[in-house]
Image (spheres, rainbow, N blue to C red):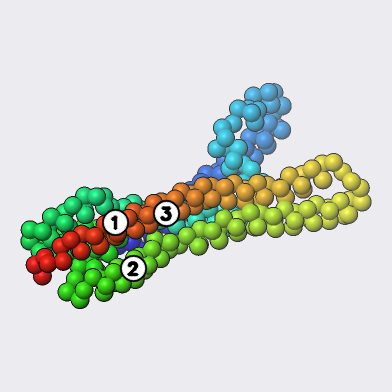
Amino acid sequence: MKKLVAFLTVAGMLSFGVSNYVAAQSDTTKAATTTQVSQTTPEVAPEAAPESNRSFHQMLKSKFIEGGAGWMSPILLCLIVGLALVVERIIYLNLSSTNTTKLLNKVETALESQGVEAAKEICRNTRGPVASIFYQGLDRYNEGIEIVEKSVVSYGGVLMARLNNNLGWITLFIALAPMLGFLGTVVGMVAAFDSIEAAGDISPTVVAGGMKVALLTTVFGLIVAIILQVFYNYLISKVDGIVNSMEDATITFMDILVRNKNAKK
């Protein structure tokens, strides 16, 4: 189920990115057509809308196309895949959150009144890593408190590793996006100097145009890295909160087992 959700998320993000790219290409075509018409009919030239009237979204699409599909596409791919992983982690971590106080009260009540099997049934019907840890401990209740403690610690380490899944890939895209931007900038600068060499003269138009296109890749790469970094820090704080909750709940759970060591098996 989790893999299906992740796949649907990635597909949705890809569709969103492609639709934006197609819309940007359509806007560019319309702008080119308008320019040609204005050149053939000078009297409508004053009606050309100034760029300051365009929305931020339109300017962003225009600058994206100016940067070149060859360099902008990998940066966009980093954003799409990175956001897909972020959405998958947010869903997983939200499903992993548990009201530990309520769960502990239910488990303690079940142990005192009905025994271990009833407490195991409560943990089995509760989602989240905390309930899974409790179930592993209760499943080895007959083997003694020491074995239960070792089982809880070992399984808790496994679940903490699961909470950190895909975070390494997000950090990869955070680092990769600006690196691709810098690479595009360097290549663009080299191309600009080649144009200057071919022209035999330092033309402000050639230099400014080439450098603008080259720097756009770095701008978009940094934007992607900033967006993913914000979400990454949120996910890290979310994981830390769940882990702290797991540790506190586990300590209380062991105290409950010690107080109810004579509960019905």
Q: Residues within 10 Å of mark 2 (few under 14, many from 20)?
A: some
Amino acid residing under circle 3: Asp
Left or right relative to 120: residue 248: right
Residue furthest to the right: 200
For residue 74, side relative to residue 94 (left or right)? right
Q: Which residue is mark 1?
A: 249
The x and y percentages for residue 232 are 49, 52
Q: Quarter holding the N terminus? A: bottom left
Q: Nearer the viewer, residue 8 or 124?
A: 124
**How far apart in space, not on screen, are marks 2 and 3 (Cα)?**
17 Å
Residue 23 coordinates in the image, percent (x, y): 52, 44
Q: Position of residue 187 (x, y in %)?
A: 74, 57
Q: Residue at x 27, y 64 (%)?
A: 133
Q: Residue at x 64, y 24 (%)?
A: 47
**Element at label 3:** helix
Q: Residue furthest bottom?
A: 143
In the rendered image, is residue 176 in sight? yes
Q: Which residue appears at 54% of the width and 58% of the height?
A: 171
Instruction: Judge by depth and name the residue closer to the eye, 78 or 48.
Output: 78
Q: Image height check: is 229 above or below 112?
A: above
Q: Which residue is mark 2?
A: 153
Q: Which residue is mark 3?
A: 240
Q: Nearer the viewer, mark 2 or mark 3?
A: 2
Q: CA distance from mark 3 to mark 1?
A: 14 Å
Look at the image and tell me whether residue 73 can be seen.
no
